[in-house]
Each structure stands twice: as structure tokens, then as C-alpha cells.
Amino acid sequence: MKLVADCRRPSCHHNQRLDLEKVKAKLGPDAPAMADDLIPRMRCAKCGGKDVGLIYSPDPDKVSGMGRRVRG
């Protein structure tokens, strides 16, 4: 999975891809990784705001064929 944190403050809109291995190292391997569990612990790295959202998506670099053009 690819996980991107997105600041929702109108004056910021910063977004950053999160390293899931670093998240696991910081919170522990058994910590839940759902948005409701992570968002209360997060702040925007740019403005420090707490109005942060998360976007989960398949990582095309790690899943064979995901997001790649099909040749025919």
C-alpha cells in the first residue's frame, strides 16, 4: 500500500507520502493502521496543523501490473 498524508487547511494543502516501515517502527508492529487510529496522532510537517487526512492506494511500484500500461 501507498499512504499519503494530506493537510486540509485551506492555507496549506501540503501532502507527503508516508514510509510505512517508519510508521510501524514508531507505533509498533501491532498498532492499527486505519485512518481513525492514525489521524489523531498526526500533524502537518509544513504548518503543524492537525486537520490531516489520509489517502490509501495500491503502490504500483510493489504490485505487479498495477498502474502500468497494458501492451497488446
Image: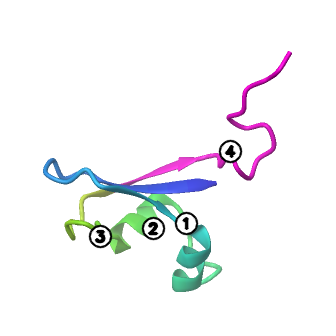
What residue is disc 3 on? 43
Q: Secondary structure at mark 3?
A: loop
Q: CA distance from mark 4 to mark 3?
A: 27 Å
Residue 66 among magenta residues? yes
Q: Nearer the viewer, mark 2 or mark 3?
A: 3
Prevailing secondary structure of the magenta residues:
loop
Question: Magenta segment, which residues?
Answer: 53-72
Q: Secondary structure at mark 4?
A: loop
Q: Secondary structure at mark 2?
A: helix
What residue is disc 1 on? 33
Is residue 72 rendered to the left or right of residue 11?
Answer: right
For marks 3 and 1, the one nearer the N-term is 1
Q: Quadrant of the N terminus?
A: bottom right
x 37%, y 64%: residue: 39
For marks 4 and 1, the one nearer the N-term is 1
| 5 shown above or below 72 | below
Q: Which mark is residue 60?
A: 4
